[in-house]
Image (cartoon, rainbow, N blue to C red):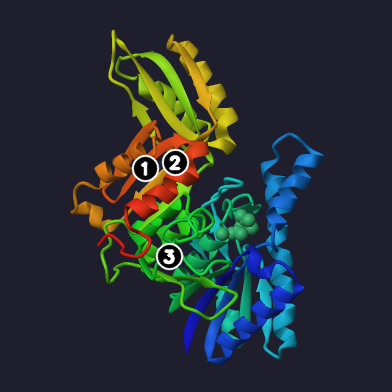
Amino acid sequence: MALVVQKYGGTSVADADRICSVARRIVDTYSEPNDVVAVVSAMGTGTDDLIALAEAVSDRSHPREMDMLLTAGERVTMALVAMAIQDLGVPATSLTGSQAGILTTGRHGRAEIVEIRANRVREGLDEGKVVIVAGFQGVDPDSKDVTTLGRGGSDATAVALAAALSADRCEIYTDVDGVFTADPRVVPGALKIDEVSFEEMLELASGGAGVLMPRSVEFGRRFGIPIHVRSSFHDGEGTWVKEETMEQAVVRGIAHDISEAKLTVYRVPDTPGVAASLFEPLADAGVTIDMIVQNVSQEGSTDISFTVPLAMLDVAEEVTKTVAEDVNAGGVSTDREIAKVSIVGIGMKTESGIASRMFRILADHDINIQMISTSPIRISCVIAEDRVSEAVSALHAGLELDGEALQ
Ligand code: ASP
Ligand code: MG
């Protein structure tokens, strides 16, 4: 009998009817027959609602209590799904992340899974039960406190559990048909991708494609677990995320992200150690940096720009201003209205001229590029946020992703 790990996202369990249809889908998979572990997210906008509630009660940060609060969202869903499955005549049991043995670091709000002791999950399966696990959460074995894995973390729970249990497949059920060549809300002609490599998916997810949490893709790659991203509303095939794909696309897809801001420090002395003196305290403050651009030095000083998540901007600004004063820099400016547009494809490793095509398309639309960064299979440009839809649409058409994919 195969072991299947399924994950159901918030929209798939948004109300009682949807919970019942998820229960039916789980029971169908169980009856094939398979062993089934289902990881569930909070219902609908449950997590956002809880965050709003916390903000209404307190404007201070309460990392531990926040995790206590947010883990409740997934806990509601797991119990309801287990009840609905039992009513269909199939034995089911629900487990919190902690009960499922998901051990994490102690960093509240962004904990990392360090180990999974899945014996209770295995016991449930051995007893012939469907095991429902609350996504996005675990426990720090030192403090015994519950933790959350960061937004979208149920994906990571599912893939990590699939790896720990050596599952035969991992299915991520969502409200879209799979991974698309661009966000279909921005580009109506975007196409569903049948297969994408872990490497490409990691770049797309990190570039802002919200369909999978980047860390879940990393787990998939590290443990060789193919991930099937598919719709919970019908039975059609979705997108397979796996090691090797049949076709090696030059450009597989486009991702965009409007959740970052840009900080620029002007006239930093161009001497050894200055970058370290800026980025060390930022790292200590837990700020994750994405792109960094340092200009050519002029008269012994240089400008450094970098991007940070909007959610960390306040801390980043504070630290940056302090460092700027310490090193006698010319000043600090902040731009919240930026967007990052990334094109991703494994074929870029061998095919030249893709960057220049991207820049030409943006130039023809009179869209200014503020920053550029690349990896062997990705090119990202920071542009003004109000031009992002136009940029994504223009690149999608110009790189022929709408049909005759550039191959
Ligand atoms: N409920 C959490 C969130 O909204 C985790 C998840 O759904 O993956 O981010
Ligand atoms: Mg998600």
Q: Which residue is mark 3?
A: 191
Q: Secondary structure at mark 3?
A: loop
Q: Earlier in the sequence, mark 1 or mark 3?
A: 3
Q: Amino acid at mark 2?
A: Lys
Q: Position of residue 123 (x, y in %)?
A: 58, 80
Question: In the rendered image, which residue does mark 2 sit on?
Answer: 340
Q: Is residue 19 visible?
A: yes
Name the element at disc 2.
strand
252, above or below 23, in the image: above
State which quadrant residue 193 falls in.
Answer: bottom left
Q: Residues within 10 Å of mark 1 (few under 14, many from 20)?
A: many
Find the distance from the CA under tag 3 to the CA under tag 2: 21 Å
Does the beta carbon at disc 1 come under 8 Å from ligand 2?
no
Residue located at (55% from left, 78% from top) = 122
Of residues 151 and 168, the one drawn nearer to the viewer in this rendering: 151
The answer to whether the residues at label 2 and label 1 have Cβ atoms under 8 Å apart is: yes
In this rendering, the count of numbered labels is 3
- Nearest to N terminus: mark 2 or mark 1: 2
What residue sits right under mark 1 in the picture? 380
Q: Position of residue 177 (x, y in %)?
A: 51, 70
